[in-house]
Every structure is written in structure tokens, then in C-alpha cells.
Image (tube, rainbow, N blue to C red):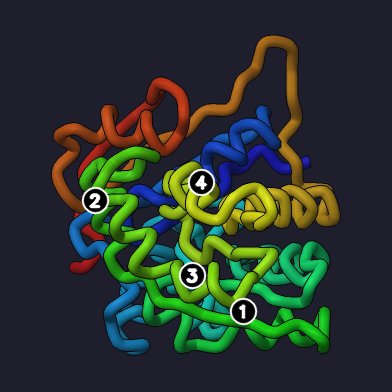
Amino acid sequence: MDNRPIGVFDSGLGGLTVVRELLDLLPNERIIYLGDTGRVPYGSRSRSTILKYARQDIDFLTTFDIKAIMVACGTVSTTVLDLVQAEYNLPILGVAEAASKAAAAATRNQKIGLIGTQASIHSGTYERIIRKENPNAQIYSVPCPLFVPLVENGHYAKGDQLVELTVKEYLTELKTISIDTLILGCTHYPLLMEAIDAFFGSHVTLISTGAQGALHLKQELVRRDALAAGYPGRIADCHYYVTDSTDNFSRLATIFLGRTVKGFVEQVVIDE
């Protein structure tokens, strides 16, 4: 058993979709969440900048004596995860591997769609993992740079005209190709799931990187015998840190978490 907290970080608030899953899967754990809201999004940055930001995020989280880190950022998970894993002496997991394996197993017609940030798409990480698991799979990738700012600004619901127009613009080609599985390659995208599902119809299986990443972390903690000890009445708790103003944090975080925000919220500086 290991009662130290879990660290989770993302470029913004999208990683809270991973926290949402972790709170359900691991009810005895303490979670330290860092949202780099002052520099969101990471997806359009250079690889060197993404690496610098990831190191700063991890350095901040390690001040809390954490037992593991969940990189709840698709961009970091696909571009520099191997580098930071080699630099830090603790388990650091990303969201791409588990989602890729789930998609490789789920497809029936071998046509898998992938949407994500420009950096995630261009890295080729998802394609490499999928083809290793399923050599017959065909992967069709589409960068969706407007999805993150849409979600961060409260536009995500089915029926929102701006959302529906953007979904149609980005995903029409994938619909024409007749994919049967779609990886939501950014942890912001689960909030768009209803709109995306309505666009494709129920015949397309949507793979959430957040849900798959959280399950992967639980499996790793079980393997290491590092789950926190539980006791009657204990519930998971989370401390939240952001690099921009905390104004409206509770309102926005409640949307991502699907529950009322309870816990400590603070603005921090991590780039000094």
C-alpha cells in the first residue's frame, strides 16, 4: 500500500476528465491536479517548448511527494513522454497507449479515426501503437485545433451551433470514409462526445483517452501494490492548482468533472 497522492497534469482543464474517472475508479486516493491554464493549449507549440512545459509541470507535482504521475495531456503523451519518463524516478503514464490499444481491439472494419491536437497527430504515436496491436488497421488522422478553445470557453453541448459547425467541418471526411472507431485523442474531447456521437451515429465506437488512461493508471498501481489504504467513510479528494486566475474555476471544473468541485484551489507560478 502507498498513501502518497497521485499527480495529474494537463495544459488546461481537459485533464479533469481523467480526474473524473480516477475519482470513480480509485475512491481512496488523494489527487494533486495541475492545469497549466496560463499557457493552454500545448498542441500548437514546438516539441522543445512542450518538453520544457512538461518538465515544469512535473517538477511542481513532485514537490508533493507523489507516487505516480498521470499525464492527462494528449500532446505531452504523444510527443515527449519517453523523454520525461527517462528523467524522473517515478512512474509517469500517458493517455495515448491505453486508448490506442482499446481502439485496435474495438474496430470491426479496421478503419480507425483519430482526432487530436496538431502535435499529437504529427507525432505518429497512436499509429505506431495501433499497428503494433493490429497490423490490419487503417488509421485516418485529423487535427482539430479549435476543439480545445471551444471547450475551454464553454462550447461543447450537442445543439450548440458553433460546436456542430466545427464538428461537421473537421469530421465529415472521417464519416465519408466509414470509420467504425474514433479515438478522442485529447482529454478535452469527452465533453464533445454527445455532439460527435450525434454526428456519426451509434455505429461508431468512441474511445476516450481520459477513461482509458485512468484505467491504465489503476492497473499500474495494482501491479505495484501501490493503492492507498482505505477505511470506512473515506472518499477521494483532490487539490487543484492552475497557472492562471482561479476566477470561474469552480464553474468550469464542475463541467469537466461532472460533479461539484470540492477541495483546495490555488493559482501558482511554475515557470520561474
The label number, if any, that marks residue 198 in the structure image: 4
Looking at the rendering, which quadrant does residue 3 occupy? top right
**Residue type at numbered disc 3:** Ile
Q: Are marks 3 and 4 in contact (CB under 8 Å)?
A: no
Judge whether 54 appears above or below 263 on screen.
below
Q: Which residue is mark 1?
A: 126
User: Could you tell me which residue is drawn at 59 percent across and 50 percent down?
Assistant: 201
User: Spatial distance from mark 2 to mark 1, Cα to Cα?
Assistant: 28 Å
Q: Give percent across and percent down for residue 241.
A: 31, 44
User: Could you tell me which residue is drawn at 46 percent across and 29 percent down?
Assistant: 258
Q: Which residue is mark 2?
A: 162
- The mark that comes first in sequence, 3 or 2, is 3
User: Spatial distance from mark 3 to mark 4, Cα to Cα?
Assistant: 16 Å
| Res. 63 in view | no
Q: Is residue 214 left or right of residue 249?
A: right
**Residue type at numbered disc 1:** Tyr
